Structures are given as structure tokens and as C-alpha cells.
Amino acid sequence: MPEKKIRVLIAKPGLDGHDRGAKIIARALRDAGMEVIYTGLRQTPEMIASAAVQEDVDVIGLSILSGAHNTLCPQLMSLLRDKGMDDVTVVLGGIIPEADIPALKKVGIAEIFLPGTSTQDIVQFIHKRLAQ
Amino acid sequence: MSADSKVSTQTVAPLHPSSTNRKPSDKEKSWAENTLRPTLAKNPERQAEFTTISAYPIQRLYTPADLSGWDAERDLGYPGEPPYTRGIHSTMHRGRLWTMRQFAGFGAAEDTNQRFRYLLSQGQTGLSTAFDLPTLMGYDSDHPLSEGEVGKCGVAISSLADMEVLFDKIPLANVTTSMTINSPAAVIWAMYLAVAEKQGADWKKISGTLQNDILKEYIAQKEYIYPPEPSMRLVIDTFEFGVKNTPKFNTISISGYHIREAGSTAIQELAFTLRDGLEYVEWGMRRGLDVDEFVPQLSFFFNAHNDFFEEIAKYRAARRIWHKAMVERYKSQNPRSWALRFHTQTAGCSLTAQQPYNNVVRTAIQALAAVLGGTQSLHTNSLDEAWALPTEFAATIALRTQQIIAHETGVANTVDALGGSYFVETLTNEVERGAWDYIEKIDALGGMVAAIERGYPQREISEASYRYQMEVDKKEKIIVGVNDFVTKEKPLETLQIDETVAARQAERLSKLRTERSSDEVARRLSALRKAAQGTENLMPYLFDAVKSYATLGEICDAMREVFGTYEEIAIT
């Protein structure tokens, strides 16, 4: 029986339109054999949580470069909990000051990928995490 | 892989360099046979192929054989004269240094006002305003979608009252100001002009630059509100208004910066930017404006990336293409329309979170390319670019970098120092040819608006961006401190944005809404709505609306009701 494909939602929360990173990750994960849904720009945490439920994804990848991560990430994590999606792995990439990382991990972000991370590192992280 | 990404593109197969059909001299042939060949037999080169950061092939050596058919008098010419390869002024930086214009903006208006005054006190010669995302998207600071974004990427401006604070004690009659705002540019400009008027500055004399480049928003930066048609109308409204009222103001800064940051190649940046420029010229002419009246108010904005010579070739080619297009396509008679003036910003996307002090070096080299390429103004990025908005410490080093180039290196002592270099002239020719190929392709698609609607430039950029990332992942392209020469280091101290900004802004807005005349605001917004349904120039209506202290969000909403909003089809 073929293995079930890993389903990933790539999302751009907030007002920022810089989508270079989100698009590269979407394509790299797809090239690595995952099923990738890209939400497009300017998604509210509500829209992202609903899409995650609807698409029944294993992973949510957020891309935030605007500095709004401290507001948007806790909102999304609490919405996911409300919807019974506690088991989904949420990862974050973008411009994230190091000082903010502990608080983001505390609300349940599994990993924060800073600029310069290779796409293989992200692929490997997802495989390892979902194998646990 | 999506179906989209299978579309064949120019970016995957770079154009053949002209050197494939070159005719070397006897002396060169003898060198290749007697000196080069034995060397290669003994010591092969480091790589089979050498390419620029844009994957453009670079040859071992450039000689007169690469420039057959090239005519120094015709193709290089003299500075200040067509085809402007060597620069748009006869004395260039000997006459006047470029304007050192550091982009700044964060928090509320009073926070940025303080940074502006600090930068001016440190010898900066012009201002450049960064607005926060709610402002860029036409939302007030207290809109639900603004949550978490207020004052983060720039300064929060929700009404004329904020703009008055932003330029408090800064004489707009003397200081030139650049404003990075696009979809709501006409509204923000109306606020700026209202502040200038209040200060008693003469509109005919004030100078500055409005970014106002909506096409590159659809292509790259994605901060658009309205569909292309009404957005272009607003841009042309500012051109028309500018010709009559503010002849010294650059009504647009046609920008390649963001196209490059989105991952394009140098040739794509050049081609898409100039084709955007031609699109604005055509829309202006269709409005009935005289080319030689409004084109002198159009300015450009390019990126300065790492690949030193490729960047210099890009700026030189840009001037040559613009001159040719103005004269041949639009029969322009005014030399002021022919000369492409540009601002440069060093490449934010080239800076690394790892070993951030290395970014000072990258920025210095990029800035040097911009200066050697003949820029009119320059922003140098701060070393903490990949972490946050700059601290005062980081922003000061960035400014000092420009001052060192200007006053210590000697590169400003002569005009177009690299002119006549076999390599630089060949690369300039090739970059120019590559850009024309794209420009003609976009012409064939029916122009830039049509090309954008088909996703053409967006797809070309995505391809180039992905290819580059794969090269980095495979270490075919080395980024020091990222995929090679990696070390552990301690975290950098970054600027913390005061989290009370949003609350301060919300309070200020609610006070504004009770103090202003709501009847007057309603009347002026309704006049704007009605005018938007017709074809009149909207600038006078926007000016009336901002002066009644209608907020940015209210004004943009009035136009949203008439124009609708734009959603792109996401390409991944």
C-alpha cells in the first residue's frame, strides 16, 4: 500500500505581501513529495485555522516578515486548539528576532526557521517530526 | 511540481553571450594557444562555468573582439548626453554627490519624526519614509486587520493629524522627502501637500518622490488594493496634478527594487521595471498628457545586489534603453524626458541573519556598484536587516558607509570610471539586449497590465527565485556564514517596537473622530465617491477629504466601494 502523502498548508497571515519565501517552501515541499496547499496572501488566523480543518493537514507552515508574529501566532494556536487540531505541526519562517523565539515555542510553534535555512532542513524536520 | 512551473522560461536558459561569434585577433589566438592552453592542461579552472548571481554566463577574458561593431562615440558617448551610458550629468559626482537618503519609519509619527531629525543632524541629505503595513494597505491603525502590524514595518499614518506630527519642525521647503507608498499614494501625497501648505512652503518649489508604482505591486511586492484599471487611473491623476502644481516633485519612482527582492535576475529587474515605465508613459499619453511635460517627473529605483559588475552594467543599460524608448517610441523632444534618474537601495535579500556584521561589507560593496553605476540617490541597508528594523547604531553605520565611499575612496573623483572596460561594456550590451527581449515579449502580450493579468512576470520571477534557492541549497552558490564558513555566534541586539503604538494610535483616532466635523467629512467623502464614479482627476477631491481629517481608511474605503478590490491568483 502506498504511504499516505504528508499534507501541508502554507499560509501568509497578516497584511504583508512578501511571498518569495512562502512560494519557495511550497514548491520545495511539493518537490519532496508532499501535498501542498498555499492559501495566498493576507489570511487571518481564522481563515488559516478553517483551511487547516477543511484540508485536514498534518503541517501548517506560516511565513511572517512584518513583525506581527507575536500577535498572530498565539491567536492561530488558540483557534487550532478550539477546533480540536492540537496534533497539527505548526512551523514558522520569516524575520523573527531571536528574543521572540522562546515565547513562540511556548504557545506551540514546533520550530522557527530563520533566514538562510535550506529547504532540505525543513523537509527533514517535517519527516522527523511526523515520524514521532 | 505544479503545471505552472513547467512553463519554459528565459530564466532557465540564459541568452547566449555575444562572445560566441567573436573574432579574436591573431595575438589573442596565439595567447590562447601558447599561454592559456598549457595552463588549462596543467591547472583546470575552479569551475566548468562561471555565472553571475543571476546565472548569467561570464567569460574568462574580454578583449576588443567582444566589442566588434561597438562604437565608443555612439554607444558610450559622453556624460550628460545621449545615450547617457556614462551618466546623466556631465560632471556626475564631481559636481554634486548623490543624495544619501536612508529609508526610515517605525512606531507612531512622533517616533519617526525623532529618527528623521537624528538622521538629518548626522549629515543625511534627504528623507525617506517607510509606512507600516496598515497604511500601505489603506487601513486605519484601529482596523481589525491592523492588529499586530501597527508601527511595525514603518510609521503608522492614519490621517493628516499624524502627517503633521511626522514632519513637525522639518521644513518641507528645504528637505526633499521620498515616500514609499503605492496603492494609497495619492491620498498620502494629498496629506503631504496639505502639511507643506500649512508650513507655507511653495508647492512649485518643493521636491521629493512618491513611490506610487502600482505595477510592481502586482508583480512583486503584492501590496495592492484596487484592480489595475482604477489603480492606473489614480497614478495618472497624480501625474496630471503634478505637472500643473508641483513641477519639481517626482510623481512616481518606478521600482525594480522589489522585483529583485522577490527573486528576479538582474535582467528581469531591468526589463520589468523599464516596461512598467513605458506602460505609465502610454497611459499618461492616453490621458492626453504631453510626454515632454510629465515624463521629466518620472524617476526610477533599482536594487544593488552582490554581483558587482552585473549591477553596474544594469544601471548603464537602463539609461541607454530609456533614452532609446523615449526618442524612438514616443518621439520625445525634451532631453529631460530622455535622462533616466534613479535611486538605489542595496539588496536587503542579500543580507544574512548569520554573522550579521558581514552585512556591513556586503552593503559597502553593493553601494560602491550603485555609485560607479551613476546613481542619483542611495539607501544603504543596516547590518540587522535580516532580524528587525534597524537600531540607531546600525542605521548610523549604514549612513557612514556612504560617507566613506563619498569622501575617502576617491571613486567620486571621476565620471564613469569603468567606461571602456571590455568586460563592463560587453556586459552592458548583453544586459541591454536581454532586457529588450523581455520588453518586446511583454509588448507582444499587449503591455504590462495584460502581462500581469496573465501572471507572466510573476511566473518568470518565481522560476528565477526557486532556481537560485536550489543553487544555494546545493552549494553551487556560496553565501558566507550561511552555507559555508559557518560559526556559532551570540544573538544581536535588535530594535524593539514599543507595543503601546497601536493603543496610542487608537486613542488618537477616536479623539480625532469626535473633534472633527463629521458632516464635513461625510460631505467630502461623498463628493470623492461621486467623482470616482466618473472620470475627473481625483486629486482635488482627495485633498479636500484629507483636509477635513477624513482618515486614510475612510478615504480608501470610499474608493473601495466604487473600484472594488483585487485578488491575485497565487502561483506556486
Image (spheres, coloured by chain):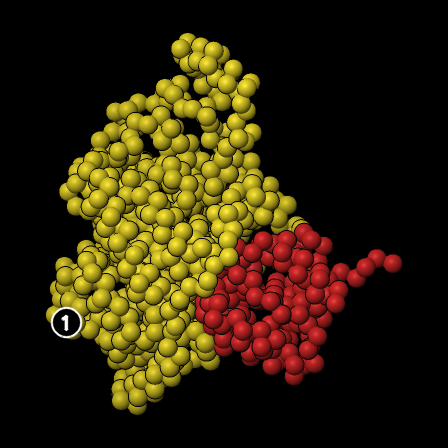
Chain colours: A red, B yellow
- Vertical position of residue B248 compared to residue B542: above or below: above
Q: Residues within 10 Å of mark 1 (few under 14, many from 20)?
A: some
Q: Can you name the residue that lies furthest to the bottom here?
A: B514
- The percent coordinates of residue A82 (x first, y second) are 65, 83
Q: Quadrant of the C terminus of chain B?
A: bottom right
Q: Is residue A82 left or right of residue B70?
A: right
Frontmost residue, B420 versus B124? B124
Frontmost residue, B539 versus B536? B539
Q: Can you name the residue that lies furthest to the right here?
A: A1
- The percent coordinates of residue B546 (x first, y second) are 27, 75
Residue B379 makes an appearance in the image = yes
- The percent coordinates of residue B194 (x first, y second) are 21, 71
Q: Amino acid at mark 1?
A: Gln
Q: At 34% from the left edge and 83% from the top edge, which residue is drawn?
A: B504
Question: What number of labels is visible?
Answer: 1
Which residue carries the number 1 mark? B199
Q: Quadrant of residue B537?
A: bottom left
Q: At 36% from the left edge and 48% from the top edge, which residue is drawn?
A: B361
Residue B49 makes an appearance in the image = no
- Vertical position of residue B263 compared to residue B11: above or below: below
Chain letter of the residue beneath label 1 in the structure image: B
Q: At 22% from the left edge and 39% from the top edge, which residue is drawn?
A: B410
Q: At 29% from the left edge and 85% from the top edge, which residue is drawn?
A: B512
Q: Secondary structure at mark 1?
A: helix
- The percent coordinates of residue A120 (x first, y second) are 64, 53
Frontmost residue, B160 versus A68? A68
Q: Is residue A59 left or right of residue B331?
A: right
Q: Quadrant of residue B138?
A: bottom left
Frontmost residue, B323 versus B143? B143
